[in-house]
Amino acid sequence: MCLKIKSQCLEAKEDITVYKLLERNILSPEKFRSFYRCVPVELEKSYESGLEVDTYYNEIDKGIHSMANLKEAIELLEWESIYSSWSGVIVECIIPKGAHYYNGTFSNFPGCIASDTITYSNKVVYTKKNN
């Protein structure tokens, strides 16, 4: 996911609720991985990443991507998951107070965020219905 930057680097003044697209293993439904990089993740854990910016393309090269808006997250999951053999889900997450982040866009979705820290809840707020 290449996030086109639409803000300066910001610091969260309070916890920010966001939504993360994940894939759930069909054979082991307790196992999740990130949607684009296929990095294994566990719910109810926090993760950190550096934030790296490609200034030539004005994109985030490294960071934890999420969506600010659940409706857009659902639209993106429905659009993207046609290519995956895993089950797509959306999990509610928190960008904690003090974390650094950028606002941006991905494809036609303007409510994207790249942060250096995210905490996954155990709330799966949407599951892609398999066709």
Image (cartoon, rainbow, N blue to C red):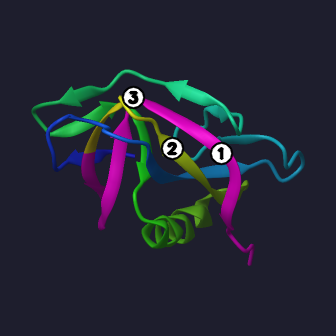
Which amino acid type corresponds to the residue marked 2 in the rendered image?
A: Ile
Q: Is residue 42 left or right of residue 51?
A: right
Residue designated by label 2 = 94
Above or below 110: residue 21: above
* Occupied quadrant, residue 99: top left
Question: Residue 85: x and y, percent?
Answer: 72, 56
Main SS of residues in magenta: strand
Q: Considering depth in this image, is 115 or 37 the residue closer to the camera?
A: 115
Which amino acid type corresponds to the residue marked 1 in the rendered image?
A: Ser
Q: Is residue 107 visible?
A: no
Give the residue at x 39% y 28%. Answer: 116
Residue designated by label 3 = 116
Give the residue at x 19% y 30%. Answer: 54
Above or below 110: residue 114: above
Give the residue at x 61% y 32%. Answer: 39
Please identify, in this view, whether the residue under mark 3 or under mark 1 is nearer the observer.
Answer: 1
Which residues, given as a range, are shown in magenta?
103-131
Q: Element at badge 3?
A: loop
Which amino acid type corresponds to the residue marked 3 in the rendered image?
A: Asp
The extreme front residue here reads: 14
* Occupied quadrant, residue 77: bottom right
Task: Check if mark 3's residue and mark 1's residue have beta carbons within 8 Å.
Answer: no
Task: Check if mark 2's residue and mark 1's residue have beta carbons within 8 Å.
Answer: yes
Could you classify mark 2 by the number of other residues whose Cα lies within 10 Å: few (under 14), some (14-19), or many (20 or more)? some
Residue designated by label 1 = 121
Q: Which quarter of the image is occupied by the C terminus?
A: bottom right
First in sequence: mark 3 vs mark 2: 2
Q: Element at badge 1?
A: strand
Check if residue 117 falls in the magenta segment: yes
Could you classify mark 3 by the number of other residues whose Cα lies within 10 Å: few (under 14), some (14-19), or many (20 or more)? many
